[in-house]
């Protein structure tokens, strides 16, 4: 009897090992040769911009199951192309002309800018985007202090996508400060679900948490529980209540890791009337204003956001709006990016100097 039980145990163990090896081989095969996982929201984007001047963007992005799309790696265009020009992405899918080490040197100060096409610098070569201007100014003003400003802007992104990218990839870059600039795409009508609700439905349609690591399990589960977009009236990609909730989630995720966080309240063309108070303030801008009012930033305890509406109010006293904006929406000319960079610098320099003092000897 003992021998029988021993033989049975050996056979079961052998069968388990064979099954485990087969499952592992299948997982490796699917990961290596199977179809790429995708988001069903990629095609609505493609349909919206295909055939327009923005249609060139489809050649610069790849599908992503969580982010919907991301910049394809190692993309370059001529400097005189339009509206995308020059360096588009490095091998990491960042708008940088060099690789960013995942772990920064102990003496480096690293600032991560997450945003949409405004942060990306649509219409400009990468050296004329405001992120590059901030980096150049800090390096000039504080020579000898290793400083890296990372441009993680992606055209078309909402705060949902920025949040998900930060959780999945952004924190791996070991930033000391994270700045978020969103709002334009968030208010745009989308499919029958907001970005967040689509993500929640996607999570609910996936396998149990213990199996989500497996691409095989995900494919089997979603073949049995297909995710479809509902019919109905398009919904804003990120309504104001969801925008406020995600802001809080980003703030909490940064605080948990000991990283400082600050949103950038963007200024749009129609926010400004010549020599008058701001007009057409958008609901999401009000959300960001209220969020910042309840927070402080830096050693001088100023309000916790970069207020570009105030900065551009001052700028149009001496410069016409059309000389600052590339279009009548949200994108900046080089002179407009300079106003943004100056406003960011004014806000973060006290924090930056404090970080210098706190660096290890």
Image (tube, rainbow, N blue to C red):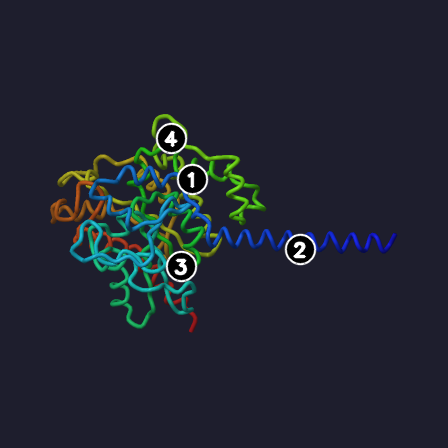
Residue 355 visible, this angle: yes
Which numbered disc, 3 or 2, marks the residue that appears first in the sequence?
A: 2
Name the secondary structure under disc 4: loop
Q: How far apart are the two marked residues, 4 and 1, measured between alpha carbons?
A: 20 Å
Residue 298 percent across, percent down from the top left: 37, 56
Residue at 82% from the left image edge and 52% from the top image edge: 5
Distance in Å between CA atoms under marks 3 and 1: 22 Å
Mark 2 vs mark 4: which is more N-terminal? 2
Q: Residue furthest right?
A: 1
Q: Residue at x 51, y 48 (%)?
A: 215
* Residue located at (57% from left, 46% from top): 211
User: Residue at label 1?
Assistant: 245
Mark before the other along the chain sequence, 3 or 1? 3
Identify the mark at residue 175; answer none if there is no mark: 3
Q: Nearer the viewer, mark 2 or mark 1?
A: 2
Say which of 246 and 351 sits in front: 246
Determine the secondary structure under disc 3: loop
Check disc 1 and report its element: helix, strand or loop: helix
Q: Earlier in the sequence, mark 2 or mark 1?
A: 2
Q: Sequence-wise, which precedes: disc 4 or disc 1?
A: 4
Q: Quadrant of residue 49?
A: top left
Residue beneath label 4, please?
192
Between residue 150 and residue 230, name the one nearer to us.
230
The label nearer to you, 4 versus 1, is 4
């Amino acid at each position: 009897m003992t021998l029988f039980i021993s033989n049975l145990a050996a056979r079961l163990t052998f069968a388990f090992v064979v099954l485990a090896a087969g499952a592992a081989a299948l997982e490796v095969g699917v990961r290596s040769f199977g179809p790429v996982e995708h988001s069903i929201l990629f095609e609505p984007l493609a349909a919206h911009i295909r055939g327009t001047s923005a249609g060139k963007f489809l050649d610069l992005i790849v599908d992503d199951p969580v982010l919907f799309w991301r910049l394809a790696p190692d993309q370059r265009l001529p400097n005189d192309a339009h509206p995308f020009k020059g360096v588009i992405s490095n091998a990491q899918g960042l708008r940088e002309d060099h690789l960013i080490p995942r772990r920064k040197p102990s003496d480096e100060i690293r600032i991560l800018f997450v945003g949409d096409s405004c942060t990306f610098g649509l219409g400009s070569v990468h050296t004329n985007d405001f992120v590059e201007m901030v980096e150049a100014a800090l390096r000039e003003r504080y020579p000898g202090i290793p400083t890296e400003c990372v441009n993680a802007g992606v055209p078309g992104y909402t705060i949902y996508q920025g949040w998900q990218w930060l959780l999945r990839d952004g924190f791996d870059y070991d930033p000391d400060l994270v700045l978020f600039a969103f709002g334009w795409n968030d208010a745009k009508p989308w499919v029958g679900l907001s970005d967040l609700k689509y993500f929640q439905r996607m999570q609910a349609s996936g396998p149990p948490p213990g199996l989500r690591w497996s691409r095989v399990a995900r494919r089997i589960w979603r073949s049995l529980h297909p995710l479809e977009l509902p019919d109905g009236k398009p919904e804003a990609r990120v309504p104001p209540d969801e925008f406020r909730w995600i802001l809080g989630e980003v703030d909490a995720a940064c605080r948990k890791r000991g990283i400082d966080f600050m949103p950038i309240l963007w200024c749009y063309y129609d926010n400004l009337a010549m020599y008058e108070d701001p007009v057409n303030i958008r609901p999401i801008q009000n959300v960001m204003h209220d969020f910042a009012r309840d927070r402080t930033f830096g050693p001088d305890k100023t309000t916790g956001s970069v207020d570009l509406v105030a900065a551009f109010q001052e700028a149009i006293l001496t410069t016409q709006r059309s000389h600052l904006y590339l279009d009548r929406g949200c994108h900046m000319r080089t002179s407009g990016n300079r106003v943004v960079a100056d406003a960011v610098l004014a806000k973060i320099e006290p924090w930056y100097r404090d970080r210098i003092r706190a660096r290890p000897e």
